[in-house]
Amino acid sequence: MPRLFHRVDPGAVPDFDDFYLTTRRRLALSAYALTGDLGAARSAVGDAYVAARHHWQKVGRLPDPEEWVRPRAWAMAQRRHVARLWHREKGIGADQKAVLDALHHLSDQQRKVLLLAHLAALSTADIGRELGETTARVEERLQVATDAFCQETGAASESVGAAMESLAPIAEAAALPAPAVVHRSGQRRRLLHTVGGAAVAVGLTIVGGVFVVSGGVVHGGVREDLASAGTTQADTRPVTEKMMLSLPQVEQLAPGDSWRELATSDNTTGSGINSVCQTTRFADPRGTGTMVRTFAADGADANRRVVQTIEISRSTRASQRAYRTTLGWFAGCTQARLQLLGAYRVNGLGDEAQMLKLRIPNAVRRTYVVGLARTGSLTVSTVSETLGGRPVAVDRAVTTLTDAVRNVCSSDPSGPCPTAVRAAPVLPPRSGETPGTLAAADLPVIGRINLPWVGTQPVPARPNIAATTCDKADFVRAGAPRAATRTFLIPEARLAKRFGIAETVGPFASTARAHGLVRSITAAMELCEKKDLGAKVSSQVLQPRGYRGSEYAMWRLDSEINEKTSVGFWMGVARVGRYVAQVNFTPSGDNDVDEDTFQALITRARDRLFELPASTQ
């Protein structure tokens, strides 16, 4: 595809319509080839041209305005592509699919180098300037990318450009807006930048996504020199790189360790996964900017890593969703052996804030203290990971999160600055699984098994598989016809079929009916050994008056099958208001838990009941 728009006289301002009409198809093609997502490419390219129209008096005087638009369009396309399937469009031919697959298997930088060389027709020096790499590094990446692309597609090296241009019919199928539409959008955007004082700053965040990195403004994660952004930017207060956590602020997490700052990025390259439990590159794929900064420390007894993330959303409502998504990553984490130990509400910090403590107890223990705050349209998080040794103290992590929020509170997208910040233990946040039931992060670590628990969908509790042969609890007959049961297994562990955790949760018409079931189960367990001479009941724990009027009880039951074989069970029951949960853990050989571990599981089952409506009535 030949370049139809050539470099212009820096003193002249070319016609925007000519620029738009002669470059838009090439840019849409490159954005589609970069992401394999036609919808993301189309919307990103359209928004990038609107921004260019807004700043055309500056952008139009650049040696090549396309070099201003392209990085912006690419970054926004990558943000919007996150969590979507690669080349999901229908009607793609086999050759086109092969091209997309070959591009997909390249790293981000390799793919960009290949596209800039063959679709944008840039020299290696120009590519290096656009990507911030040396010419030698660009030449190396281009050679590796070309070889890999040719090997996978069967194309000759001189045909790489033609192979990628075969995607043009697909890219052109996504109709871009007419020049008049871009004009109106650009003028509207410019109006929001010049009218309204403080409202202008908010408008910039909502409409254009203002974001600063090292003295430049970033729209959707791409740097733009202030010289080309227009003088009205001076009245705005965007988020800046200087507002990220500093090394002295992070050092207070473990003052005796040797800390160092590793990197700061916009998270548009690489896998985008920066911490345990994170499932997608961005919590807000439609956000206008992201910054990630990492730190590391080597201590006498532990190694540590801290990741700070700031995501800028287009509105407060969007940041609320981003906050919930980020919180759900950790509260509903399914990482093997990971356990949610505790949660803390942090008052006085932004609009809402929480701390979570998690661990993975392997030969070398990993502990995570996660801080998360929402302030205005910003979502700020800090994840402190400790490998071995004493984990980061929660109160120190609260101080670091407070510093992170205070650093950005002078920016336009932020909410109020921190006031009297206090943290207090609270019930665990919702996991994203069935409300009121246990989640994977609640379950115990079993022996040396390094595989995740997997839960089934709830089914009617007919029969109640969480009951034992002693209690034979029947939720339906007891007054909970809508009781449901789910099981948790470790499918790939190759354990006995009986191994697993079963939980039944049922709503009763009243607290008295719910308490009646708990009382009948307790009575049945007390009589079990008398009625079944082959049964042994031990490790009994009764908690009739617990947190906020709740109650729970638990037992160990061992039943003889014959003179040489017995089967053990852990069983517990918990009540909160009119809801009851019964939990049964059936071990397999040495893959068992102790009394304290099962008691922690029962108390967590009780805590989950507080998620249900009117649970304390």
Image: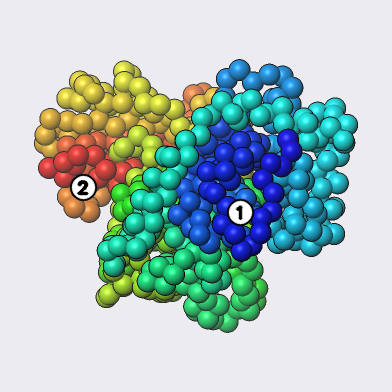
- Residue 422 spot, x, y in % from top left: 29, 71
Q: Residue at x 44, y 60 (%)?
A: 210
Q: Which quarter of the rendering shows the N terminus?
A: top right
Label 2: how many Cα within 10 Å (few below 14, some 14–19, many 20+): many
Give residue 181's quadrant in the image. top left
Question: Given the image, on which type of amino acid does mark 1 rest?
Answer: Pro
Question: Given the image, on which type of amino acid does mark 2 rest?
Answer: Ser
Label 1: how many Cα within 10 Å (few below 14, some 14–19, many 20+): many
Q: Are marks 2 and 1 in contact (CB under 8 Å)?
A: no
Q: Earlier in the sequence, mark 2 or mark 1?
A: 1
The reply to whether residue 12 is in sight is: yes
The reply to whether residue 296 is in sight is: no
- Residue 547 spot, x, y in % from top left: 22, 54
Q: Residue at x 74, y 38 (%)?
A: 2
Q: Which residue is mark 1?
A: 65
Q: In terms of secondary structure, where does tag 1 sit?
A: loop
Q: Residue at x 35, y 22 (%)?
A: 459
Q: In terms of secondary structure, where does tag 2 sit?
A: loop
Q: Which residue is mark 2?
A: 550
Q: Residue at x 39, y 45 (%)?
A: 184
Give residue 64's quadrant in the image. bottom right
Residue placed most toward the observer, 144 or 115: 115
Q: Which quarter of the rendering shows the C terminus?
A: top left
Closer mark to the observer between disc 2 and disc 1: 1
- Residue 516 spot, x, y in % from top left: 16, 34
